[in-house]
Image: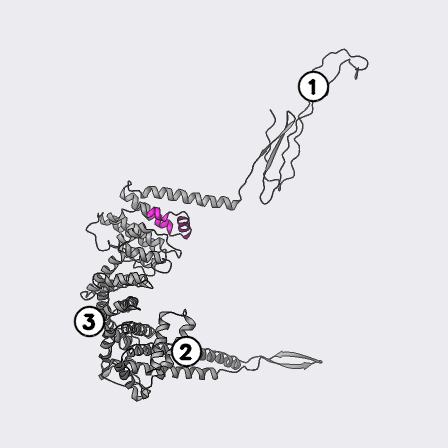
Amino acid sequence: SPTKAVYNARHWNQPESEALPAPPALKTPSVPVRLSSKEAIHKDDGVFKAPAPPPKVIKTVTIPTQPYQEIVTALKCRKEDKELYTVVQHVKHFNDVVEFGENQEFTDDIEYLLSGLKSNQPLNTRCLSVISLATKCAMPSFRMHLRAHGMVAMVFKTLDDSQHHQNLSLCTAALMYILSRDRLNMDLDRASLDLMIRLLELEQDASSAKLLNEKDMNKIKEKIRRLCETVHNKHLDLENITTGHLAMETLLSLTSKRAGDWFKEELRLLGGLDHIVDKVKECVDHLSSDENEEKLVASLWGAERCLRVLESVTVHNPENQSYLIAYKDSQLIVSSAKALQHCEELIQRYNRAEDSICLPDNKPLPHQNVTNHVGKAVEDCMRAIIGVLLNLTNDNEWGSTKTGEQDGLIGTAMNCVLQVPKFLPQEQRFDIRVLGLGLLINLVEYSARNRHCLVNMETSCSFDSLCTGEGDESLKITGQIDAVQALVQLFLECERAAQLAESQTDELIKEAPTAQHDKSGEWQETSGEIQWVSTEKSDSTEEKEKKEEDDEELDLNKALQHAGKHMEDCIVASYTALLLGCLCQESPINVTTVREYLPEGDFSIMTEMLKKFLSFMNLTCAVGTTGQKSISRVIEYLEHC
């Protein structure tokens, strides 16, 4: 048999292989023969010595190929005059090998964990498998693999019975929360969404769950808490690790743009909206009874989270809007109205205003020695309530009428515009005022009943007009006044403040420093050449230049502040003018009432502000939206008054 072939894998680092040395020639035994004279070649001893056969040669040949190396080992031997070759093909690149290894590792891990999630496994094994899977899902690379192979739906299908076991439901909710931390779409199907909604119902329902040892439950909660600390958990209360809390935070994160319209539809069809509305009612009922601050904050945050979900699913979705208005005789609107009134009372008790505000009769504001956390929870809840009501009343006469029928809601909305901002930090006042104005516009745009109610209402004028130490004395009004008069007063003040801020900004721009000559040196002529010779700076010169730079930066900041204040005043004035214009529609009496409080009874000051606002919207919003149509309609109506 031939000698074994030599495999030379690194031919580029070694000299080309040589032919193996021939084996020593073996002597053939002498055979006496009788030779003729012609055949005799060597007659010394009368014996012919036959030449030794040629040795067999084995060569190793390496053939480089592109783009990778294909190694060919050739074995030459004499067998029926043919050369045989052994070829090793498709040698993988090391990157391909690494990728294959990662995929194989993922496959092994997911098969092992899925086997532990099955219902025939012990409960402790299933919980441990879910926690292990959630730990791996904390890594973005594993989440990518999980989605690429379509395993998310399969995992939750295996855990479909988790709501029957308290500890397993907690682990499943934690897995959902970890998966929702990704910025990519969470590949939930209808069955997974159904499971999430069922987990939402378990927040306070522990009677039907199979309770385990409290020690085991605490261990699971501690593992989940440590796991959640490794991911983005801005809105998660780590001290309140419950199934409902984790499921709600997961649902809240999915109601953003990445959820899609199918999610809004399925949430309604699966009954998810019913549970969320019921949860809002439960939290609102606790607001009037909770005296403990921790319980109060928990109720506020619970209502706020649910309202954020409802706000998201009702944006540009008439089906969900109509469903929520009709559900249990407008239960959501009733609960929202009550919650807004409670928040109006709480915001005065938990005042977060940074500056002291003067009140009539020199009465101090009710400052309470409470944590800042409570006041912030009240503010967030108020914004969520108004956001939901804005969606339910936008271009919806039915929603506007139902909302306006709630006892005291229009008055509460007026207070959100005129009085509530004084209890908020300076940077939050603009938001709540604009939200209140937007809600009032929606309420009166299509409802004659609400217009009549607002015109005949009495209220206090805006809080900032009472505390103004400077300005036109004619604008200062104290005591209870008509709501229309208070709104006209607010419009005039904001319009004048916007003009003042605009003029001050123009002055700052005109006073901008001109370009100064370079004083770091001077041109000098030496030896027939002109050269720039730098001068040494003294300490006083450097200090002067630094002061000039600081002054320029200060002027720029002032200009930006004036521009921001100007924008806020313009928007508030425009919203107020739009509200007054909606009150004037189809009502000559209201036109006369508004005209009485305007300077010289002229609507031109309002139409001018609305035209500026409409131009701004045309630049920043899509042309033809309902808001622009409403503004154009009001402008046209006021111009003919």
Looking at the rendering, the stretch of residues picked out in magenta corresponds to 131-155
Lateral position of residue 42 relative to residue 450, left or right: right
Q: Nearer the viewer, mark 2 or mark 3?
A: 3
Q: Circle 3 sits in a helix, a strand or a loop, which is it? A: loop
What is the number of the mark on residue 27? 1
Q: Circle 1 sits in a helix, a strand or a loop, which is it? A: loop
Which one is nearer the viewer's eye here, 324 or 635? 635
* Picture layout, residue 17 above or below residue 595: above
Is the Cβ of the residue at disc 1 closer than 8 Å to that at disc 2? no
* Picture layout, residue 318 above or below residue 616: above
Q: What is the quadrant of the C terminus in the image? A: bottom left
Which one is nearer the viewer's eye here, 254 or 392? 392
As drawn, which residue projects farthest toward the left?
A: 289
Q: Which residue is mark 3?
A: 407
Which one is nearer the viewer's eye here, 156 or 233? 156
Q: CA distance from mark 1 to mark 3?
A: 125 Å
- On the image, the x and y values in percent for residue 362 come to 23, 83
Q: Residues within 10 Å of mark 3 (few under 14, many from 20)?
A: few
Q: Nearer the viewer, mark 1 or mark 3?
A: 3
Q: CA distance from mark 1 to mark 2?
A: 111 Å
What is the number of the mark on residue 563? 2
What amino acid is found at the position of numbered circle 1 in the picture? Lys
Q: What colour scheme governs how the chains and residues are painted in the rendered image of this protein?
A: one colour
What amino acid is found at the position of numbered circle 3 in the picture? Asp
- On the image, the x and y values in percent for residue 626 come to 35, 70
Q: Nearer the N terminus, badge 1 or badge 3?
A: 1
Is the Cβ of the residue at disc 1 closer than 8 Å to that at disc 3? no
Lateral position of residue 517 relative to residue 578, left or right: right
What is the number of the mark on residue 85? none
Q: Nearer the N terminus, badge 2 or badge 3?
A: 3
What amino acid is found at the position of numbered circle 2 in the picture? Ala
